[in-house]
Image (cartoon, rainbow, N blue to C red):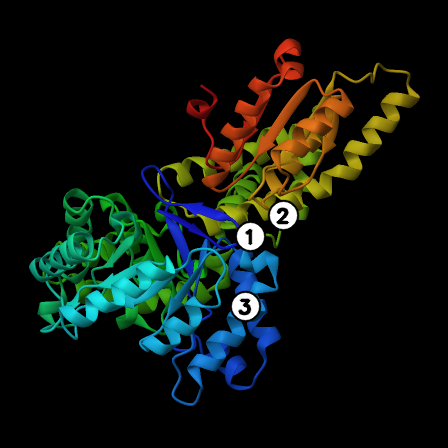
Amino acid sequence: MLLSGLEPVRIGEGSLFVNIGERTNVTGSKAFARMILNGQFEEALAVARQQVENGAQVIDINMDEAMLDSQAAMVRFLNLIASEPDIARVPIMIDSSKWSVIEAGLRCIQGKGIVNSISMKEGEAAFIQQAKLLRRYGAAAVVMAFDEKGQADTYERKIEICERAYRLLVDQVDFPAEDIIFDPNIFAIATGIEEHNNYAVDFIEATRWIKQNLPGAKVSGGVSNVSFSFRGNDPVREAIHTVFLYHAIQAGMDMGIVNAGMVGVYDQLEPVLRERVEDVVLNRRPDAGERLVEIAETAKGAAKDDSKKYEWRAGTVEQRLSHALVHGITEFITEDTEEAYRAILAKGGRPLHVIEGPLMDGMNVVGDLFGQGKMFLPQVVKSARVMKSAVAHLIPYIEEEKRQDEAAGRDVRSKGKIIIATVKGDVHDIGKNIVTVVLQCNNFEVVNMGVMVPCHEILARAKVEGADIVGLSGLITPSLEEMQYVAAEMQKDEHFRIKKIPLLIGGATTSRVHTA
């Protein structure tokens, strides 16, 4: 699947889970609804911007409010987004129950977006007609597991409706299979009603069946629905979202409408809470709901209990830095980085050793959890910001060390010149900037070209500067393709071939496999 705002987003085999920002939705966010109703569109744009900055790869926009001219509000908001490149770079999901609002939105968006949603609740004829219009607009479609009999609430009904819709779309409408996104309905669990106990399992198993039997189709869903029984108890809701996503993604769930602030780190959940939530999500025992309710208030109280909240502060400085990085906590990062620096300095070490030691150890934990699907992109972005704060605290010490080396007449000659850039289509640069600091500490001359840098500019600058190495950075999956393109262009260019200039790549989605 290829989507785009101002930049492309590819979703397919090997792609990371796609977080769809949910806060620009008047039905799901009272604060956002208030802004739109009061005509505070600049403030509403700030909500969209914050979602993108926090790692949302798609933003869901819904204006379905009884006291609102939904169509006019949708058009105005989308037109405002179009004039903000930092928001418009991600694809838009137009979310409405009104077809007129959907069609008005499709006329506004740049690139290729998603429509949320179409279904067979009004019969096959209406479904086919809407699908044909979406195909004409070039949009991908969220297809609800909903037919003339109602919403699918069992595994059997979910796969029956999804298969029927798939056949209609592919065989009769000639709708691209890769542009079909099924939503097999995420319902609330632990409601106290026995018939609801298997809702999460039914979704997870339906997801697995869709991925195995409907080639090309993707799976999405509104994640916050699953924890609705515990509204008002954020720690339990967060734990439910975390456990549910961990298992749903393993089954093949491609994307979801998620509040990134309400998803935790699977391995870091309190063990008893995680076990009881897992019992509920996987329906492992008949009394699972009651057992979770038993500890729900305790979990809520623990989140408010400052003594427990700060228990991690009792660990070693290395443990504290790792915890702060994994959980995205900036509150104590300056003092902990300073303590680590003093300890390393006392042993004859350098400020660089704080970065290469405890800070990188913590980021390696983040990388491992991310690779195992136990952390998600928005959480990695928060971790990177903590790392950035720690490195910023060390920079004055690093610069002072350089001045002392020069004054003492030590050899500070350059070991080589490196051009480094975040590739076209990617605005993430925290990791690249940290690498720049480390290289400079090791007497490399670094030309940092910034973000969103096209291939031809990177190669031209490398020639002008006489670079010995070219470094490419990127966080999102499409950046890998841009890196491959740069590598291919370097191979074609005699300058890079003859001089055998090496290419370095880095970023959350890269691995040794990509350098082969």
Residue located beneath label 3 in the image: 47
Q: Could you classify mark 1 by the number of other residues whose Cα lies within 10 Å: few (under 14), some (14-19), or many (20 or more)?
A: some
Query: Are the residues flagged by discs 3 and 2 in contact, CB closer than 8 Å?
Result: no
Secondary structure beneath disc 1? loop
- Give, as a three-letter code, the residue at label 3: Val
The answer to whether the residues at label 3 and label 1 have Cβ atoms under 8 Å apart is no
Q: Quadrant of residue 116?
A: bottom left
Contact check, label 2 and label 1, Cβ < 8 Å: yes
Q: What x and y, as percent, mark residue 205?
A: 15, 51
**What whole-number distance in Å separates the C-alpha atoms at marks 3 and 2?**
26 Å
- The residue beneath circle 2 is 333
Name the amino acid, label 2.
Ile
* Label 3 SS: helix
The image quadrant where one finds the C terminus is: top left
Q: Nearer the viewer, mark 3 or mark 1?
A: 3
Q: Earlier in the sequence, mark 3 or mark 2?
A: 3
Q: Along the line of sight, which residue is nearer the eye, 214 or 234?
A: 214
Q: Residue at x 51, y 61 (%)?
A: 51
Percent of width and height locating residue 400:
84, 32
